[in-house]
Each structure stands twice: as structure tokens, then as C-alpha cells.
Image (cartoon, grey):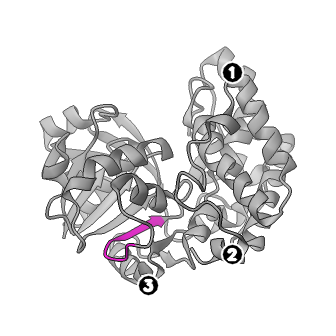
């Protein structure tokens, strides 16, 4: 299969390596704004991986030419943080054809709709199949030039959903070769609300803000950063997330339950479940507060979660407090910035019944 991977950061390089190691012809693209590991991989023509996935995998093209990457691809994997989705969509748009399957990985917050909007595809244009996964299938970090380290590859606890919904099974089948444990989600609301990053990252970051600034992130994010008090904050956020899902008729699992299912964790709780988790061991904290753990997981996803909550009448006092605190710490106003909203996704005005049909 011809596979195009858009985004050459940690996740994009992990996806490119895995699909190439499975024998597919992989091309890797990054915009000039987010070059990632483009030059190093282009020079070597391959990605090296250590950890749970190990070996060397050839990458047939790596560069900034979207047409060369996307044209003729059977599967297009759009891999990166929420703030990269629209730029990757605009780069790919002139080269998309209806027979291609597109997957935003991970969703972050209705990433499939964000891709459609930026690529000029209406949300009800069923000629194009655009889906999203609930999370990235790996815990992965760049460990050197053209080299990644994979801490964990998920064997379960990963879902995909498509727009239109009728395409979900096709995407599950396509992705199943490389991700055999992937399941078909009910809708993109399920994949979006199952995303646990807003539960974990903001709480740990805010509670360790002084330590991050004082040490430049010289500590282990999970092992050192999570205590009983941090776990209680995570639990409060997770309870609100699950209440939003229930109001929309979506069935999702708690984040610790998913962590155990995915193989990251052994204990299903919000404290030692994370701090002693084998899959999180050795993952370092971010070097500064101005990091996607706040700018993405609060500024994009949590803001959208609270908007969904208001639409269905669910109170979110803890999420609101996290958004306000993160805004104050960074000297920003995440509610006012709101880069991912129902309105800019083309979904404004939908009531609970309308949202549940997405």
C-alpha cells in the first residue's frame, strides 16, 4: 500500500517507521514551519527505532513537497498536535482524490472535521473519507537524528471513527494490519471525548509549574510529577469529561481504565496507577510551561470540551478552573483565543440531538 504520512514530529516518525517496517511504501511530509526530522531522514533514507519497536525502516521520500507525498497514496495519515492539522490539510488539499482514505491521528478534538474544513471539504461531502483515531498508537520520542525510541505501542484501547460514519469499518480494516487491536468507535464524538490527554497533561503541568520553570523539566513527568493531590485533580477533570460523553449518548472509559487496557498502566487509579506505570517510565517533563500540554490540551481540546458541555447542559467547574489557571500562567486567554470551536468547525447551532448524529 502507498502510505503518506503528513507530519514529521515524534508521532509522525513513529507512524512512518511502523508502516514502512510492515512493508508499505511510505512517504513523509512536513511543512516548512514544522520541519521535524525531515533533513536527517532524507539524508539517511530511513528511520531507526529502538525500544518496543526496533530496527531500520526505509522511507521512500521525505521532504516538503506535499504533491509528491500525497499523490497516489492509498492511505494518508495526518499525524501531529491539533495546531498542525489545518496547515497539513491546506498543504494536502490540492492533491486529494476521493478514493484516498485520510486519518487524523490522533483526533485531539474533532480533528477529522478540522481537516475537512481546512481542506475545503464540507462535513457532509461523503465522496471523501476522513477519519480520526482516539489517540496516538505509541508513546514515542525522537532520540537522535532520524532515530526514535518507542516506549509503548498500543495493543488495545485504540479506536477509529470516520466521517461519514459508513466509512468507519473501511478505516478499521485498513489500519488493522498495523494496529491489530484497533476498534470501530460509534462516532467522532467518541474518539474525541476518549482522548485522555486533557485529563493528564494539564493537571500534572499546573501542579508542577514551579518545578518545570526551576529545573527546565529535569524530572520524570509521571513518576515524579504525580502525587495523590495531582491524581484528585485528574479525577475531577475526568469525571466532567465522562459526564459530557454521557450527555451526548457516548460510551467512553475512564482514563485509568484505558491506560490499563492500552498496556501503559497496571493499577487502575489516578495516583500510583500513573506514577508507577511501566509504559510511562522515563518520560521526561517538558522544558517550559509554554508547551502543547497546555497550549494544545487546554487551548484546543479542553476549551472545545467545555463548549460541548455548555451545549448539552453539563457543568464543568474544574475544567473551567484549569483553563483560567493555564491562561493566567501563560499570560493568555484560552477562552478568547479558542482556535477549535463548533463554529469554526462548521458545526455551530447544533443541539444535543444534532451533535449526537456526528
Q: Is residue 63 left or right of residue 158?
A: left
For the residues labelled 2 and 3, the Cα–Cα distance comes to: 17 Å
Q: Which mark is residue 273?
A: none
Other residues around mark 3 within 10 Å, as few (<14) / some (14–19) / many (≥20): few
Q: Is residue 213 left or right of residue 72?
A: right
Quarter of the image that includes the N terminus: bottom left
Label 1 sits on residue: 331
Quarter of the image that includes the C terminus: bottom right
- Mark 2 or mark 1: name the one nearer the start of the chain: 2
Other residues around mark 2 within 10 Å, as few (<14) / some (14–19) / many (≥20): some
What's drawn in magenta, residue-wise? 125-132
- Mark 2 or mark 3: name the one nearer the start of the chain: 3
Label 2 sits on residue: 250
The residue shown at (54%, 51%) is: 344
Cβ atoms at labels 2 and 3 below 8 Å apart: no
Element under label 1? loop
Element under label 2? loop
For the residues labelled 3 and 1, the Cα–Cα distance comes to: 43 Å
Q: Was residue 129 drawn as part of the magenta stretch in this picture?
A: yes
The residue shown at (59%, 23%) is: 288
In this view of the protein, which residue sits in the foreground, 47 or 113? 113
Label 3 sits on residue: 166
Cβ atoms at labels 2 and 1 below 8 Å apart: no
Residue 278 pos. (x, y %)? 60, 52
Q: Would you place residue 32 above or below residue 102 in this image? A: above
Q: Is residue 149 visible?
A: no
The residue shown at (43%, 68%) is: 131
The residue shown at (15%, 39%) is: 42
In this view of the protein, which residue sits in the foreground, 133 or 98? 98
Residue 203 pos. (x, y %)? 74, 41
In this view of the protein, which residue sits in the foreground, 94 or 198? 94
Q: Is residue 38 visible?
A: yes
Amino acid at each position: 500500500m502507498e502510505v503518506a504520512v503528513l507530519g514529521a514530529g515524534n508521532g509522525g516518525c513513529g507512524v512512518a517507521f511502523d508502516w514502512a517496517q510492515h512493508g508499505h511504501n511510505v512517504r513523509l511530509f512536513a511543512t516548512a514551519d514544522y520541519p521535524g526530522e525531515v533533513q536527517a531522514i532524507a539524508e539517511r533514507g530511513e528511520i531507526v527505532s529502538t525500544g518496543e519497536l526496533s530496527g531500520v525502516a526505509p522511507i521512500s521520500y521525505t521532504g516538503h513537497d506535499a504533491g509528491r507525498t500525497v499523490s497516489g497514496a492509498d492511505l494518508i495519515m495526518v499525524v501531529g498536535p491539533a495546531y498542525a492539522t489545518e496547515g497539513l490539510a491546506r498543504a494536502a488539499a490540492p492533491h486529494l482524490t476521493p478514493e484516498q482514505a485520510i486519518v487524523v491521528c490522533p483526533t485531539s478534538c474533532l480533528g477529522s472535521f478540522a481537516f475537512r474544513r481546512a481542506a475545503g471539504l464540507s462535513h457532509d461531502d461523503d465522496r471523501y473519507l476522513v477519519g480520526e483515531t482516539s489517540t496516538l498508537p505509541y508513546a514515542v520520542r525522537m532520540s537522535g537524528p532520524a532515530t526514535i525510541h518507542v516506549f509503548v505501542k498500543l495493543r488495545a484501547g485504540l479506536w477509529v471513527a470516520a466521517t461519514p460514519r459508513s466509512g468507519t469499518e473501511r478505516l478499521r480494516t485498513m489500519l488493522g494490519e498495523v494496529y491489530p487491536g484497533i476498534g470501530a468507535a460509534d462516532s467522532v464524538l467518541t474518539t474525541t471525548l476518549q482522548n485522555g490527554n486533557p485529563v493528564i497533561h494539564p493537571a500534572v503541568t499546573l501542579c508542577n509549574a514551579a518545578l518545570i520553570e526551576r529545573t527546565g523539566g529535569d524530572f520524570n513527568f509521571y513518576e515524579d510529577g504525580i502525587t495523590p493531590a495531582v491524581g484528585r485533580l485528574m479525577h475531577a477533570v475526568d469525571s466532567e469529561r465522562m459526564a459530557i460523553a454521557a450527555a451526548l449518548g457516548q460510551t467512553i472509559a475512564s482514563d485509568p481504565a484505558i491506560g490499563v487496557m492500552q498496556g501503559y498502566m497496571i493499577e487502575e487509579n489516578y495516583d500510583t496507577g500513573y506514577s508507577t506505570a511501566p509504559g510511562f517510565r522515563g518520560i521526561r517533563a517538558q522544558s517550559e510551561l509554554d508547551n502543547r500540554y497546555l497550549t494544545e490540551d487546554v487551548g484546543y481540546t479542553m476549551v472545545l470540551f467545555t463548549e460541548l458541555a455548555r451545549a448539552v447542559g453539563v457543568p464543568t467547574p474544574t475544567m473551567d478552573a484549569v483553563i483560567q489557571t493555564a491562561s493566567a500562567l501563560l499570560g493568555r486567554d484560552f477562552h478568547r483565543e479558542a482556535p477549535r470551536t463548533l463554529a469554526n468547525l462548521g458545526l455551530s447551532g447544533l443541539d444535543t440531538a444534532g451533535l449526537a448524529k456526528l
